[in-house]
Each structure stands twice: as C-alpha cells, then as structure tokens.
Amino acid sequence: MAKALLCRVGWHKWQWRSTDDGSRYLVCRRCGKQGEVGPLLGGEP
Ligand SMILES: [Zn+2]
C-alpha cells in the first residue's frame, strides 16, 4: 500500500504513543512515521 497523499505532502496524522519506560513520542497513524516532541504537535503548517 502506498503512502497516503497527505503524508506524502508532509501532513501526517500525529498521535501520542508511549514506550515501556514511560517516555512519549509522536507517530503518524497513517504511515507510521515517527515525529519529535515540539513543533510537530498539532500538525505542520
Ligand atoms: Zn504520515
């Protein structure tokens, strides 16, 4: 399956995930790309 069009243009569906050790990170629900905490939260401009 190809990446979603929105992901290809950089508009990912960010969602918070937690690791076993309790740290949090962002991951795209559509393509699985992992983001970083900070400006990515809430989507990209
Ligand atoms: Zn994505």
Image (cartoon, helix red, strand yellow):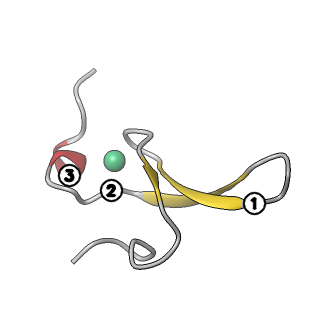
Residue at disc 1, secondary structure = loop
Q: Residue at x 84, y 46 (%)?
A: 20
Q: Secondary structure at mark 2?
A: loop
Nearer to us: label 1 or label 2:
1
Q: Is residue 40 left or right of residue 6?
A: right
Residue at 25%, 60% in the rendered image: 11
Three-letter code, disc 3? Leu
Q: Is residue 32 left or right of residue 10?
A: right
Which mark sits nearer the N-terminus, 3 or 1?
A: 3
- Ligand 1 is within 8 Å of the C-beta of the residue at disc 2: yes
Pinpoint residue 13: horizontal percent, then vertical percent.
39, 57
Q: Residue at x 20, y 52 (%)?
A: 6
Query: Tag 2 or tag 1, which sits nearer the N-term?
Result: 2
Left or right position of 17 against 35: right
Query: How far separated are the C-alphas under marks 1 and 2?
Result: 21 Å
- Tell which circle, 3 or 2, labels the residue nearer the N-terminal end: 3
> What is the spatial separation of the Cα atoms under label 3 and label 2, in whole angstroms?
7 Å
**Residue type (three-letter) at the residue carrying disc 1:** Ser
Label number found at residue 12: 2
Residue for badge 1: 23
- Neighbours of disc 3 within 10 Å: few (<14), some (14-19), many (20+): few
**Kind of residue at badge 2:** His
User: Mark 3: is the Cβ under 8 angstroms from ligand 1?
Assistant: yes
**Measured from the top left, where is residue 31 in percent x and y?**
37, 39
